[in-house]
Image (cartoon, rainbow, N blue to C red):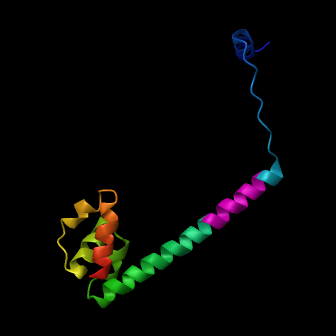
């Protein structure tokens, strides 16, 4: 008898049985993950393209849209808001208000 089985049997706990999934389930899971990834990538590209266009229209470099924190700094400059508002974007719930104020400016 396996040592772990003996240990579990000694505790009076029934061994947990898990269902075995085969190739059809694994294929379905891979398909769902692939579709999810594709949708995510399309949305990501659209977001970057939109920000790039906004930055270009405002006279800022378009490549700034793909630099993580720097794109917020540029966005705040375009909106005419102080750069320290980035700190407010780290506070839950307040970040939604700040994002709304920046997008309306």
Q: Which quadrant, please, contains the N terminus?
A: top right
| Relative vertical location of residue 92 with respect to residue 40 in this rendering, above or below | above
Principal secondary structure, stretch drawn in magenta: helix
Q: Residue 22 vs residue 78: left or right?
A: right
Q: Against 8, is 56 above or below?
A: below
Residue 54 falls in image quadrant: bottom left
Residue closer to the observer: 26 or 91: 91
At a point 26% along the width and 82% down the height, the residue shown is 105
**Residue located 19% across and 75% down the image:** 81
Give the answer, above or below, for where 27 lies relative to 46. Answer: above
x, y percent for residue 25: 79, 52
**82 to the left or right of 94:** left
Farthest top residue in view: 10
* Quarter of image, res 30: bottom right
Q: Which residues are magenta?
A: 26-36
Q: Is residue 84 magenta?
A: no
| Count of numbered badges drawn on the protein | 0
Place of residue 95 in the rendered image (x, y in percent of width and height, measured from the top left): 32, 63
The image position of residue 53, as x and y in percent, is: 38, 86
Residue at the far bottom: name it.
57
**Residue drawn at (24%, 75%), measured in percent from left and top?**
76
Give coordinates of residue 27: x percent, y percent: 77, 56
Residue 33 painted magenta: yes
Towards the viewer: 80 or 74: 80
């Amino acid at each position: 008898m396996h040592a772990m089985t003996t240990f579990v049997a000694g505790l009076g706990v029934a061994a947990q049985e898990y269902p075995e999934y085969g190739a059809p389930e694994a294929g379905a899971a891979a398909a769902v993950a692939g579709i999810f990834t594709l949708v995510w990538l399309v949305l990501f590209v659209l977001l970057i393209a939109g920000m790039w266009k906004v930055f270009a229209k405002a006279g800022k470099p378009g490549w700034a849209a793909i630099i993580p924190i720097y794109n917020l700094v540029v966005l705040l400059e375009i909106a005419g808001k102080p750069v320290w508002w980035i700190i407010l974007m780290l506070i839950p719930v307040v970040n939604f208000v700040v994002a709304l104020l920046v997008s309306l400016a």
